[in-house]
Image (cartoon, helix red, strand yellow):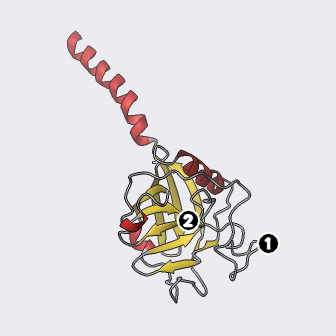
Amino acid sequence: MKLFRLAAAGAFVFASMILPSIASADTLTIQLKDGPVVIELMPDVAPKHVAQIEALAAKGAYDNVVFHRVIDGFMAQTGDVQFGKEGGPNYNPARAGTGGSDLPDLPAEFSKVPFERGTVGMARAQDPNSANSQFFIMFDEGAFLNGQYTVVGKVVSGMEFVDKIKRGQGGNGEVTNPDKMIKVSVGKK
């Protein structure tokens, strides 16, 4: 009996050391019109980018930000907190996608994580070190982005709601009357 109690205590201690690291995964939950999308963030892959996304989400910067660029079979882009925040003081649909946040641009954190359906990557200008607040969710595989853009996470539930985001027109995917991220929150899984 003493041996059993010792083994049980050892198992409990082991589980308490291992399980918190599994259960404490950083998540981003985006409430869309059709339902919630949960993204498991990857601070081990892109620590600076994940920290910036979490900081912006925590202060409500992403709430009511539109999906300004949505290309069927490719991706849905959002996160312009400067010009894409519907109801915000600087909201300008014509400029949505050209802004960022009041935080500094980030140095690239490219990795070997591939761009697949559900991958979340940081949008940027031609300069690899220009990512700020905008990000995109992949509808499909995009190997041509591998090693060229920073991966920050992966959709773990709600991809069916991402699939319902209104698509844009034209080659650049500009969206008229776009869908938006209603509420964005940070949490632990």
State the CA–CA distance, disc 2 to disc 1.
23 Å
Residue at image coords 68%, 81%: 93
On-image quarter of the N terminus: top left
> Under tag 2, what secondary structure?
loop
Query: Where is residue 83 drawn, in percent x and y?
Result: 71, 73
Outermost front residue: 127
Task: Report if the CB atoms under discs 2 and 1 are less than 8 Å apart.
Answer: no
Amino acid type at image mark 1: Pro
Please determine whether, in this image, residue 182 is positioned above or below residue 147: below
Compared across the picture, whether 161 is left or right of 69 comes to left
Amino acid type at image mark 2: Ala
Q: Residues within 10 Å of mark 1 (few under 14, many from 20)?
A: few
Query: Where is residue 177 drawn, in percent x and y?
Result: 61, 86
> Under tag 1, what secondary structure?
loop
Quarter of the view holding residue 157: bottom left
Residue that carries the numbered disc 2 in the rendered image? 123
Residue that carries the numbered disc 1 in the rendered image? 89
Query: Where is residue 113 drawn, in percent x and y?
Result: 38, 54
Residue at image coords 69%, 71%: 85
Q: In this rendered view, identify the residue nearer to me: 149 or 122.
A: 149
Res. 1 visible in picture: no
Residue at image coords 53%, 82%: 172
Q: Residues within 10 Å of mark 2 (few under 14, many from 20)?
A: many
Please determine whether, in this image, residue 89 is positioned above or below residue 19: below
Query: Closer to us: mark 2 or mark 1?
Result: 2
